[in-house]
Amino acid sequence: MCHALTGDAHAAGHHGDPDRPGWWDNLIGPGRPLDTDRYFVVSANVLGGCRGTTGPGSADPSTGRPYGLRFPLLSVIDLVEVHRALIRHLGITRLLGAIGGSLGGMQVLQWAMDHPGELAGALTVAASARLSAQNIAFSAVAREAIMRDPDFAGGDYYAAEHSRPDRGLMLARMIAHITYLSEASMREKFGRRIQDAAEPRYGFDVDFEVESYLEHQGRSFLKRFDANTYLYLTRVMDYYDPFGGDPAILAAKLARVDARFLVLSFDSDWRFSTGHARDIVRTLSAARVPVTFREIASSHGHDSFLLPVPEYHRTVAGFLDRLAADADAP
Amino acid sequence: MRPDLTIIAALLGRGERVLDLGCGDGELLEHLIVERGCAGHGVERSTEGFHACVARGVPVTQAEIEDELPELGGEAFDWAVLSSVLPATRRPARVLRDMARVAPRRIVSLPNLAHWPHRLALAARGTMPATPSWHESPNLHPASLRDFEALVAESGQRVARRVLLDAANRPAPRPVRARPNLWAAGAVYVLEG
């Protein structure tokens, strides 16, 4: 499985504290759609990340200091290449499937397109083959928030005595988090309730519950994320365009795709709406790639891909069942 | 396989690309994919039908046919199949036009409202022929074979082939051809143009 922008290798289970499970714990485990009694699940950090695999915070071997913005710009192709190296290292030649949500789904699509024979199934959830101007605009504002933070220092903020661009990264996270929720889910979750009080305090400090929530999301993000990684990975998404370029080359490439696709979207997701999924489906179908597609009803917006929406999980489980049955058949 | 699906399968060649609109549990497509080397894609609105297709390994989109057809690009399919679904669509004429845009050849099967037992029921008892009842029937636009053929002609398409069906959805015996709109329980049409 391939993780999204702010995910990491810790997808399921916990490290001693059952209240802190992995981010896809409801999908992975015994009896769950990615049933660990039946499947081996491989989960790794992405290249450019800040949770394990090399990223802008890693030491540049030529200088011994963190790369910062000297780290090369990445593409989804690079992310996939590093995952493939891990898979080869594990001695695996063919995977039953690759699954990912959002940026994870982009990696899955790229993988299936570039490397026929390696995946029996490709499962993309709440993903896109091409960010819209609106998507890029949100990313741009988030990056601006980071880069305009006085502590950003051109990306060289890693020294122990240096402050990190926390205000910028926090703001970036707050902006992005709004795009992960739907208006309905925010209304349901917070409404116009006042934080810790019955009456408004009438001022510019945090007063509404939703403000408190966003601030909490932003602040807790600082503990686990690196501002430079945020810049690099959002840029990976902005430039992603696997169906772009010369149509003849694309057609030749798609003609070789042998993975069976499951493409899922959520009706309340406005970050990567169903239109994004439909673009993937349309392009693959026109190239005769077998695609199963479904828009799942869920009020939780883009975040739905992280939640145990029953019909979503049932569809993933059913699709994997069939892949497994075909893989076992002589 | 349902007898009418067997008839439809026999009309299709090997290795063709087939769009099955209202594919149900995917029985026809699975047969075409596994036995005939076709590339198939289904459109099914019901959740149970969708999951049945997934379990069969049939590529499927969960959607209403009439919402999905405009989304599909031209010339992606060799055949589009609409089996027993046309009377249940909101705009049958538009469905036929959209199918013609999506696939050069189409198969449409439908029950015949003017089949003699229906005429008898209407004439003798004065009741609508519908299962389970007129108000629970999914059919919004029931039609006789004559009605349907007139619509085909109006939309600039032509019937390349017609297989008449008996009440068990099997090919009807020869005498039925004399007055199909009276004696046939339904028909499978191949449309072109």
Image: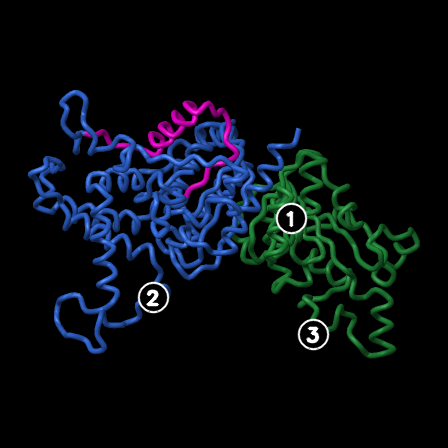
| First in residue order: circle 3 vs circle 1 | 1
Q: Are marks 2 and 3 on the same chain?
A: no
Q: Are marks 3 and 1 on the same chain?
A: yes
Q: Nearer the viewer, residue A97 or B181?
A: A97
Question: Which of the 4 quarters of the picture holds residue B88?
Answer: bottom right
Question: What is the distance, in whole Å, between disc 2 and disc 3 at their CAs?
Answer: 41 Å
Labels 2 & 3 near each other (Cβ < 8 A): no
Q: Secondary structure at mark 1?
A: strand
Q: Which mark is residue B135?
A: 3
Q: Position of residue A80 (x, y in %)?
A: 38, 31
Q: Position of residue A132 (x, y in %)?
A: 33, 48
Subunit bearing disc 2: A
Labels 2 & 1 near each other (Cβ < 8 A): no
Q: Specify the colour of chain B.
A: green
The reply to whether the magenta stretch includes residue A84 is: yes
Question: What is the distance, in whole Å, between disc 3 and disc 1 at their CAs?
Answer: 27 Å
Q: Which residue is tagged 1?
A: B20
Please name the residue shown 33% across and 64% down the image: A186
Label 3 environment density (alpha carbons within 10 Å; few <14, some 14–19, many ≥20)? few
Q: Secondary structure at mark 2?
A: helix
Q: Position of residue A54 (x, y in %)?
A: 26, 30
Q: Given this view, does label 2 or label 3 mark the residue nearer the observer? A: 2
For the colour blue, the matching chain is A
Q: Which residue is tagged 2?
A: A189
Labels 3 & 1 near each other (Cβ < 8 A): no
